[in-house]
Image (spheres, rainbow, N blue to C red):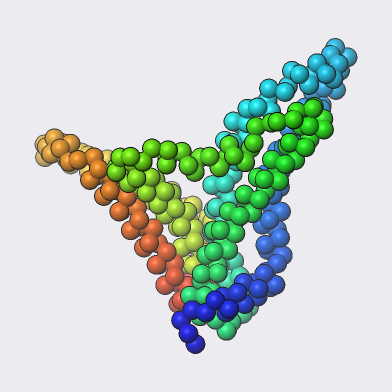
């Protein structure tokens, strides 16, 4: 069997969608619901607000008083950015089909290589979730525009889609300095590394992954804070020359941080792949 074959990769995708379609449908409904429900609630509350004050103002006056909200979607943008980060935590369900013993038997006996099966799970969990979220935002934007026009006569509301996704391009507005590029790499890969721990947890422990990885993050932050505090006290005790660090060029520090974040990101995915390749029908961690 060759190392990687695209046709087998597509067969893995078709098999996964066929066997686990109920799981993917539930995930789609949850994401789309979290995106769309606040839009619907917003319009219901606006109509309810008019019903409350209908004896004092007519509908035209009420519409003019609330139309400003259609040109400022800051509240929606903050909510959707937080929701996106929450949605990407679904990486903890990357190997959801390995939870049961029968699922592991079906996965490990599938006529495909480890790299093909692993790549499909990674692509589906990350890019699939991202695609569903983006599509849901666009649908919510369309519903927002249609209801705004139909109910309140708003013809050109601010786009929720453009306002939400603009966050991914703010860091690239000014890249004329080399340390800015390094800073973007550090922030991007640092965030991706944190998310990737959920995929690593999914390969290590198939059940209750979210709880285990969340506990891991809490312990990691506590240990990091404790280590930082102890290191600071140690440096103060030995009268460490802070000026020596201050003399290091900022771009060197920025690229060192970026390299560290990229290395951690690659290490996490390498460990995830290694654990997946060593998956067995029954183990002490996954009975």
Residue 278 image-quadrant placement: bottom left
Q: Residue at x 42, y 38 (%)?
A: 173
Q: Nearer the viewer, residue 48 or 262?
A: 262
Q: Nearer the viewer, residue 68 or 32?
A: 68
Looking at the picture, how far across and down is residue 222, in whole percent? 37, 46
Q: Residue at x 42, y 54 (%)?
A: 193
Looking at the picture, how far across and down is residue 179, in whole percent? 29, 42
Looking at the picture, how far across and down is residue 84, in whole percent? 57, 46
Q: Residue at x 37, y 49 (%)?
A: 185
Residue, far right: 55
Relative to residue 268, is residue 251 depicted above or below?
A: above
Residue, far top: 56
Query: Is 255 displayed left or right of 206 in the figure?
Result: left
Looking at the picture, how far across and down is residue 236, in whole percent? 16, 36
- The answer to whether residue 268 of the structure is visible from this angle is yes
Q: Residue at x 33, y 58 (%)?
A: 263
Q: How many numbered marks have been drawn onto this rendered protein structure?
A: 0
Residue, far bottom: 1
Relative to residue 63, is residue 187 depicted above or below?
A: below
Quarter of the figure with the C terminus: bottom right
Query: Is 49 displayed left or right of 160 in the figure?
Result: right
- The answer to whether residue 93 of the structure is visible from this angle is no
Relative to residue 104, is residue 185 depicted above or below?
A: above
Relative to residue 120, is residue 186 depicted above or below?
A: above
């Amino acid at each position: 069997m060759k190392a990687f074959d695209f046709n087998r990769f597509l067969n893995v995708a078709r098999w996964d969608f066929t066997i686990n379609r109920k799981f993917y449908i539930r995930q789609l409904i949850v994401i789309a619901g979290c995106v769309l429900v606040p839009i619907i609630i917003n319009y219901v509350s606006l109509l309810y607000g008019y019903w409350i004050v209908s004896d004092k103002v007519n509908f035209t006056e009420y519409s003019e008083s609330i139309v400003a909200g259609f040109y400022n979607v800051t509240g929606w943008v903050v909510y959707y950015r937080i929701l996106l980060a929450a949605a990407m935590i679904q990486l903890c369900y990357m190997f959801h089909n390995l939870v049961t013993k029968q699922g592991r038997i079906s996965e490990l006996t599938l006529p495909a290589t480890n790299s093909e099966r692993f790549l499909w799970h990674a692509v589906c969990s990350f890019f699939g979730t991202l695609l569903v979220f983006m599509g849901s935002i666009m649908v919510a934007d369309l519903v927002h525009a249609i209801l705004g026009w139909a109910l309140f006569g708003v013809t050109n509301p601010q786009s929720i889609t453009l306002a939400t996704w603009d966050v991914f391009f703010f860091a690239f507005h000014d890249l004329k300095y080399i340390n800015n590029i390094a800073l973007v790499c550090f922030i991007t890969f640092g965030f991706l590394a944190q998310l990737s721990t959920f995929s690593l947890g999914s390969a290590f422990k198939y059940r209750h992954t979210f709880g285990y990885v969340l506990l891991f993050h809490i312990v990691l932050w506590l240990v990091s804070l404790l280590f930082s505090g102890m290191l600071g006290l140690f440096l103060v005790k030995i009268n460490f020359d802070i000026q020596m660090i201050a003399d290091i060029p900022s771009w060197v520090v920025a690229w060192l941080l970026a390299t560290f974040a990229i290395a951690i990101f690659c290490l996490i995915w390498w460990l995830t792949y290694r654990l997946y390749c060593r998956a067995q029908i029954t183990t002490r961690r996954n009975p």
